[in-house]
Image (spheres, rainbow, N blue to C red):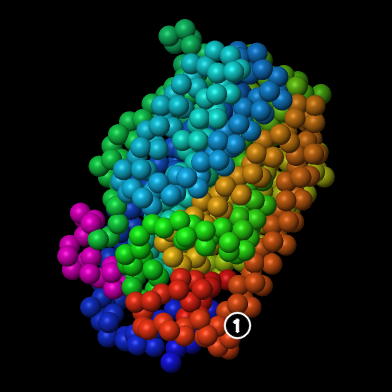
Amino acid sequence: MVEKTQPSEAPKLASDSDEALESVSSIQDKALLRKIDLHVLPALTLLYLLSFLDRSNVANARIEGLTTDLHMTGNQYLTGLTLCFIGYVLFEIPCNIILKRTSPRLWLPTLTLAWGVVATLMGVAQNRAGFYAVRFVLGMTESGLFPGVVFYFSMWYKRNEQQYRVALFFSAAALAGAFGGVLAWGIAHMKGVGGLDGWRWIFILEGLLTVVVSAASYFFITNYPATAHFLSNEERAAVNTRLKYDNDATRNEAFTWSNVSKAIKDPKCWLYGAVFHTMSLPLYTLSLFLVSPILSFPSKLGNPPNSRYTTAQPTIITELGFSAAAAQLLTVPPYACATIVTITAAMLSERWIRRAPFIIAGSCLALIGYIILLSAPAPGASYFGTILAASGIYSSNAILLSWPGNNVSGQTKRATCNAMQISIGNVGAVIGTQLYRSNDGPRFFVGHGVAAGYLVGNVLVTSLLWMVLKRENERRDRGERDDRLVGVSGEDEWLGDDDPRWRFQT
């Protein structure tokens, strides 16, 4: 006899007893969760902040003259951005397979060290070919961090706890945007030091910071609960108990290629990828071009004194007619607002155990922002539209990127699905890097229009996945999948998310 559960609840077996959880009182459970958060979240969030900073600081460097010094046209610069995401897409699944076969404490710091070295080398690129090569390798080395961390969280937290932690982790991207603008503004004042231009110092100093942090991270990244040095034996037992009856994190699952194949053959995994694909194009075009389209309106304001910007260089804040320094600082408010909205939406999503409605709401908010960008030529209105777009895009991404971790059961399948989602999604980033071309400024109807169309697509794909998961839960509630349990004895034989006792979070 299988106990039926509501779709939003964690699955339990009929033999499960509430007494199995008595060893962890509610107060102890909260204290334990806070302890895990304190040791797991800050370290990984710092790595992702550096990852996003090292990937997107190219836009800040462009303001300080990167394209001029490397003799690149605006479209050649876009090719460099595209190559970064091609490297990203190609290596995400292999990176998560390596993570499953090694350990987080070894693999995640090694990736960080690799991309830190590469990011530093960008500061010494002497020509377009060097810029292209470094951008591709940067994408390759950064590719394993985000999908790896999402999988890692699924081994520490209960299903309904993962989404909020992923949102906190992802908010580092918004913080990187805000922090990056201020940092780039300060570093740019080093122009001439050592005979180097300001944009070179942006890459060198931020890359070296990543290298230093990566060396330390070998000591502060923890593997999994069973070997965590900061947990006592009693606390490890408590973690095991709280996870055992919620997900598969405590199961000793060996890596097999057949489990990789399960993810590839599951249409839901492709839909998770499509949900991110339709959101990644707006996400990365916003982060990579925010500091370029709001400095112009040159016909009204002219190029500022000593600016290395010309009207042929597109990107969202420079089109408002501000100096390079002011443009760097004006990137802060959109990202700050995005951080606040992202964390608020994550808290509400966790409280109500709903994912799709919040993704759709964020997409609609961002869509309003792009409509303003497309229809309102006034600089102030465009800036407000940018704030709305950033808030909606970041809040939706934080939730949708945790969705497979909530719903895919089977450790190898989940690791593969996480990587598939990011790989499929970042194809959107590859496309997006070619949209904001020099001759489209200052309004950039093509870039903004495609981003708006992608947001509409996100609403449609998210609604489709919501319907698929909801209907599958209803079939399991009616017992239509119980035939899969024939020959299955007890909890030791677990069928992953194909198990009729599993319920998908919608």
Pick the front one: 7 or 330: 7
Determine the residue located farthest toward the left in the rendered image. Answer: 233
What is the quadrant of the C terminus in the image? bottom right
Residue 44 in magenta stretch: no
What residue occupies the far top of the structure in this picture?
Answer: 195
* Number of numbered discs on residues: 1
Establish if 137 lies above or below 476. above
x%, y% of residue 142? 47, 38
Describe residue 452's horizontal placement relative to residue 494 as left or right: right
**Principal SS element in the magenta part?**
helix
- Callout 1: SS: helix
- Mark 1 highlights which residue? 474
Left or right of 167 in this view: 276: right
**Residue depicted at x 49% and y 65%:** 408
State whether residue 499 appears in this view: yes
- Tell me if 209 is positioned left or right of 172 in this view: left
Q: Magenta residues, as a range?
A: 227-242
Residue at point 61% right, 49% down? 425
Q: Is residue 443 above or below residue 427?
A: above
Q: Residue at x 51, y 45 (%)?
A: 92
- Residue 158 falls in which quadrant of the image? bottom left
Assign the N terminus to one quadrant of the image: bottom left
Percent of width and height locating residue 46: 39, 43
Residue 25 in the image: state x and y as whole percent. 26, 77
Where in the figure is residue 474, as x and y percent of width and height? 60, 83
Q: Residues within 10 Å of mark 1 (few under 14, many from 20)?
A: some
Residue at position x 18%, y 68% from top?
234
Kind of residue at disc 1: Glu
